[in-house]
Image (cartoon, rainbow, N blue to C red):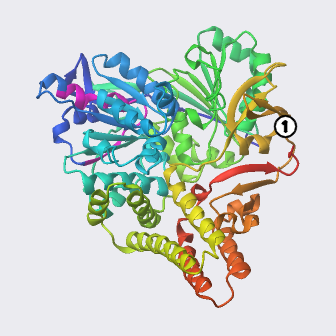
Amino acid sequence: MTESISIKIQPQFVETSQEMFRGRRLHKIQQALLHYDDLPEFTIVSAPTGTGKSFAFPLPIVQFREAGIGFSKRRCIIVSPTNALIEDMEREYTTNFAELKISKLNRQKLDELNAKGPDRWNMLLQVIKEHEVIITNPDLLNFALFGGYRRHKGQKEISEIFACVDYFVFDEYHLYDEEQIANILSWIAIKKALIAKPVKFIFASATPEKELNEVLKSQGFSPVEIIETISEKETPDSRKIHGEIEVTFLKDSSPFQYLLSSADDIHDLINKGGRILVVFDKMVDLRKARPDIENCFCNVAVSEVSGYFTKSGVQEKPGRAALILGTNKIEVGVNLDVSICLMQTGKYFANFVQRFGRIARQGKDGKAVVFLENKIREIEKAFSGKEVLSYYDFIEQCRSIELLSDNKFYSEKIPRFLGAYYFVIAKNIKDYATQRLFMKNLRMYGQIGFMFGVMRKIEKAINHIERINAKTGKRFNFDCRNWKKWWDIFTGTFKYFRASSPDVLVRDLTFGTQGIITRYSLEWILKNREVVREESMNGERCLVVSGFVEGKQELQYYVESLPVYKLSEETLYLQQKEKYLLKQAFESRLAKITNSFYRENTTFNNAVQNLIIEVEKLNCVISEKRLAIGDIKAYSNII
């Protein structure tokens, strides 16, 4: 049986224009952004890796400066999905655009500025106003716009962000799901409803989501697409962006097995100046493999890009390493300057394409070894007699045999989430006149209006049962407190751009007798690591881990956003199997609450029953992002 297939991908070239900028000929997208005034309100940019997409983002500001137009600044916010990419962009821009005022804006930055409480909002605005290029993540922006930073009436409203920014860039937006795209659309709605000043929005990706164009049109916008194409043919006006890539598909092997079995060859490549990237699909596989890899390559500088050490004192520097270990964290944007990539395929086809983009950059040749669990026969058939292919032919052949499935994007989900986001935004606007203006200028139709209306009815129904309680001698204080608390927690989940799950301090004894202190997902630790003891570190819980759990762990989640808070505390405990059936879990808790507390025919019970009828309609916005997880326990790992 065939165990491996090898083919070659031809070098890739991108056409350049005749327009020069600081000694370099601009690509199509770079030229378009340099002529910022000609850009429409919404632009969708499709640019394969290596085409200088990120270099283009500050060009409108450079052009504005050089034109010397007035005394004001032109300002942009670049929204990047990962902190690694934020750091990479900041380094690149500081080097290439030294004259610009550039700053990252994330939680770490605000902590460094010692901003706490309401001052965090003030400092966020100050950082934006003092710089021209602000690089942030969607988490911080969403948290701020949805009232995450406590604000009082004397402070600027959330619309102030849009008042002092000229354009937003949503880089690598393909990583966002339907709910997150709805998130971003709700930010745009804030601008459209409250700020008359023109603001432009640019969505950029190497693997664009085809549905985005239709989604924007459905909201009344008129996006224009700019597509940077690459070719295998060199012309006098082209630039080489990727060299030749030798691709080998291997069956029934793994990056770890390959590294150890080919150690002599790998050492030889490294001694000749080669840099190797190893991409694992699962963090647990990387964690298990790293000690043995370091033992095998004890004289080689090894680094990791995975997120495991992000919140630790360990600062690994992949730029100085010959052997880089990573997970899907390395897929977007970051230029690691590697010539060889040993990669598992990833979960979706977009993961596979992005991983290919890490190698053979800047016109250099490279090699990729792809590890497969199946599909080797389909690969052999698809590439039979095709030893050399263009990049696009290679990608299409892999897609045609369904090497991996595409992550389906269901645009019809977006309106219901938009309605929910609009309600939460309006709820958190402190100034009454601003709130009324926001609601007046929203496009409320179909599912958007339906979900906005549902959440408004729930809020009114909770106020109604509080009035009944007041008229009956406050007999139902306990019920009312728990309904109100649950609603505050539930609507508070919309502040988080991604699913929120608690972190925990970890002392990992894999790294010597004292171990390394880091902070990582409590869920992941309990699922995968053996917890040998618990200790306190500066008053904070710290789990000491060593080794790995064998078999599956059964987890139990304490979720405060499940109905109805502590009215019946047992409803807050979510079993692991229920986490994959959240809509049913939500419904079952409402049924339990109704049967346990509100079956009698009384004025208060009837009012609560009407409230529950509306709460049931929230089912269509129930997702993992609605889980406010307070704690997690593992049955075989409970200390």
Quadrant location of the N terminus in the rendered image: top right
Q: List the single residue furthest toward the bottom.
A: 601
Residue 423 on the magenta segment: no
Q: Where residue 192 sits in the image (x, y, percent)? A: 26, 55
Q: Residue at x 37, y 74 (%)?
A: 446
Q: Where residue 339 sits in the image (x, y, percent)? A: 55, 21
Q: Quadrant of residue 102?
A: top left
Image: 317 above or below 164: above
**Residue placed most toward the observer, 36 or 439:** 439
Amino acid type for the residue under numbered disc 1: Val
Q: Where residue 455 sits in the image (x, y, percent)? A: 47, 70
Quadrant location of the C terminus in the rendered image: top right
Q: Residue at x 75, y 25 (%)?
A: 290
Q: Quadrant of residue 221?
A: bottom left
**Residue placed most toward the observer, 148 or 474:** 474
Q: Is residue 88 visible?
A: yes
Q: Is residue 4 visible?
A: no
Counting the numbered discs, the total is 1
- The magenta segment is 42-64
Where disc 1 sits, the SS reads strand
Q: Where residue 271 sits in the image (x, y, percent)? A: 65, 8
Q: Residue at x 40, y 51 (%)?
A: 184
Image: 283 above or below 562: above
**Residue placed most toward the observer, 97 or 625:** 625
Q: Residues within 10 Å of mark 1 (few under 14, many from 20)?
A: many
Image: 583 above or below 242: below
Residue to which mark 1 is pinned: 531
**Residue placed most toward the observer, 622 or 17:** 622
Q: Residue at x 55, y 78 (%)?
A: 611
